[in-house]
Amino acid sequence: MIDINVPQDTWLKWQASIDLITRISNCVGVLRVVDAEDQLCAKISAGLKAEDSGSFEAINVKDTSERVSIALLWPSKAIFGELSFYFIEQTDKAEGLTDCLAQTKQLARLTADNIELHLAELYRQYRSQESQIRGRVSNGDQIDLQLFIDSLKEHVWMKDTDGRYVIFNRSVEKSWGKTREEIINKTDEELFVADLAEEFIQADTEAINKGEQITAGECEGQHAEIDRYWLETSKVPVVTDDGCLKGVIGLSRNISQHKAIQEQLELSGRVFENSVEGVMITDRDGKIIETYGAFSEITGYSREEVLGKNPSMFSSGRHDKAFYDDLWTGLLHKGRWHGEIWNRRKNGAIFPQLVTLSSMLGDDGLVRYFVAVFTDISAQKKNEEQLAHLAYHDPLTNLPNRMTLTAQIEQELRHAHHQGSQLAIVFIDVDLFKQINDSFGHLMGDEILVELANRLTAKKGAEDTLARIGGDEFVVLFPGGGGSEELTLALSKLREAFEQPFSVGENDQVRLTASMGVSVYPHDGKDGYTLLRNADAAKHRAKQDSRNSYAFYTESLTLESREHLKLQSALHMALEEGNFHLVYQPKLNFNSLKTVGFEALLRWEDPVLGVISPGIFIPVAEKIGLINSIGSWVLREACLQGVKWNEQGKIFGRIAVNIAGQQIKRSSFVEEVKQILNETGFPAQSLELEVTESFMMSDPEVAIRDLRVLGELGVELSVDDFGTGYSSLNYLKKLPIHKLKIDQSFVRDIPSDANNTAIAKAVIALGHALNLQVIAEGVETEEQADFLRESGCDEVQGYLYSRPQLPTELLNFLL
């Protein structure tokens, strides 16, 4: 719209003219003018009834009546407004209405002409004042217009009132691919296709009607040297000082780069909006300017609630200044920061986020925006805490487990060494507890163990550590307590825990006793392993002697270890003389019970010692360093067996081989596996290696490095005995593993043992969350199988389905 002020006295003159017409013609008159939003707004009204006085809406409601309307224009042809007269009460005679309409049209036309005369004079005065303010440039200082516009890269042109191109620059000629002679004095209809010409003409008309500059919009252009590009065109009417319209000037600029950025931002916006992560963007001053994705779902704040605010509104107060200093140092120097932050939701709840912060630079190389992409890791943290607790505590009694006890012993040993003091370890074993389980069931046995743990806790000192290390075995660590009198008193207190009977059901009671063994630092050992071993040996002596007693460790007990020397020598001979052999236990799909593979298990039958359990000779082999040679032999024999089955056309899935931690720690292990595969011709895709959880967590970086190489060969990798150690979810995600194996110690007592049941479910859920297969070993009963199958376990092995057997005995499991 043309923004020229109309004096009040002029409005009054127009009001009087309109009032006169409404009285003569018995009608309602209204003058509407164009407002700042290009809408017609009623400015003057006349002829309304008393009840409708001042109500322009009353006139609009009756727009369907007979009326006379005339457009009011500025001298430049821009629209000023509209003068309308409405016949509210129509005469009964048609000819009377016709005469009245004709008369009103004449009077309205005269009034409109009068208004436009006033507008022309106001326009002339306005332009005259503008010229005086701007001043005039002398002819000697003017530059050639054509020279000026030819220097511009934008397209510049002017059309006269008939729509002919009378002025244009070289950019227009070059862009349109036409010469000056082909464009001059031509109209849009002559230069462009009909649809495009019509679009251009409509934009010209809009600029003239509004009397001001307009942006005609965006369109695709064509260039002789460029396939396609985007133009944005602005148009403005050319009007002389006396208000005479001379034409329209247009300027088009190439916005292709802007358009590409805009499309990229729109695409990014759509990606962000559909992201399952929260996205927040701030300007360089830290004010939030946009949010996307799961932002509201995670934080509880709507987009409107946070715009313009600082992200400090989410602060939990858990991080100190040093934390944020490190964050900003990384973000400003590296352009990126990744880590965990504790923030606060709208409801006040504090929660952990995994956040990636990035800085976005402008063309000047300075930071313009910061982008935060974050996820709520509350569930992950909870799972990690639960697993960590299970890793360090006995799930039944909630006492420290063997791992925690070992760490505590090492800490107290360092203190005792520094102080020159003693410490004692008491190993407690409940006598004949197996009879309790056999007579009353494992569930009742577990209740008794919980009660016993509570009693022992009440009897130990505040500085002492009580741990359950398995079954019915407990260990008490007495720091600083190595004197005989002090120990005797402590043992008496512990034995008091067994004085009262234990309730079994509602009416029955049982009495329990315990055998205890004691070792003292530094007399009975200088390290935790030796002290525990010697306390265990003393406990066995107490149990052998009479039960319900305790015994202190003596050096004579070490004589029993001489038997181990015989075992060591026999192991060397077994490897040399070929006394080892492999048996294979089928691994089945839990749903179909079809064979998915076999686990190769080592067996040893010595000519003198007879059949020796792997649980006895494997620890010895590890201790004397023979496990590497034995492990290589097992891997080679298993691969050779797989080759035989392949040659026989048997389908067996994968053969799983247990790998000791000492084997993988060797730098040559990966090459050794490759060599065995090459020499035997066994495909890597048919091999599965089972690695213990404890080894992977003892040196996770080495495990990640070596296992990743094996995984790339096609070897499948499994975590054996999962749940018996401590695994970091962060490393589990990085390790190239395919399967978790639930340790048989957890399977043994399910579903009767609530704690083992919970652990099994947790391992299955964790495995599936990490897209891993889960297999349970040691399944011996239908109840165990039903529970694991219903819990979603993928694979199974155990005596319920098959004992480990020789290859010739496995025909029913080979497809």
Image: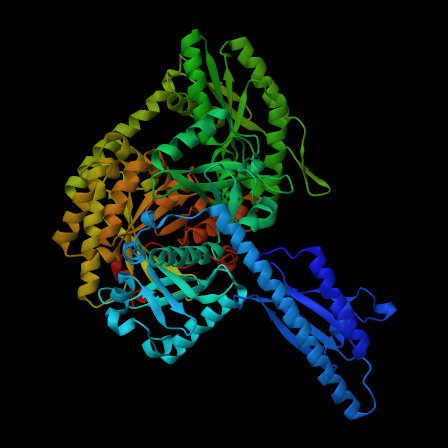
Q: Give residue 270's position: percent from left, percent from top.
A: 45, 58
> Does residue 191 sit above or below 745 in this rendering?
below
Which of the 4 image quadrants contains residue 413?
top left
> Where residue 702 appears, x then y in whole percent?
28, 37
Q: Is residue 788 visible?
A: yes
Residue at 21% in and 32% down: 569
Q: Nearer the viewer, residue 5 or 475?
A: 5
Rendered position, 209 above or below 733: below
Pick the residue in front: 132 or 621: 132
Q: Nearer the viewer, residue 176 or 802?
A: 176
Name the quadrant of the N terminus: bottom right
Q: Is residue 600 above or below residue 611?
A: below
Q: Position of residue 466 (x, y in %)?
A: 54, 25
Where's residue 404, x and y in %?
47, 28
Residue, x 43% and y 25% (percent of image)?
407
Kindly tell me whether residue 749 is visible in this rendering. no
Q: In the displayed structure, would residue 712 be above or below residue 539?
A: below
Identify which residue, 151 or 448, lies in the foreground: 151
Q: Is residue 127 left or right of residue 88?
A: left
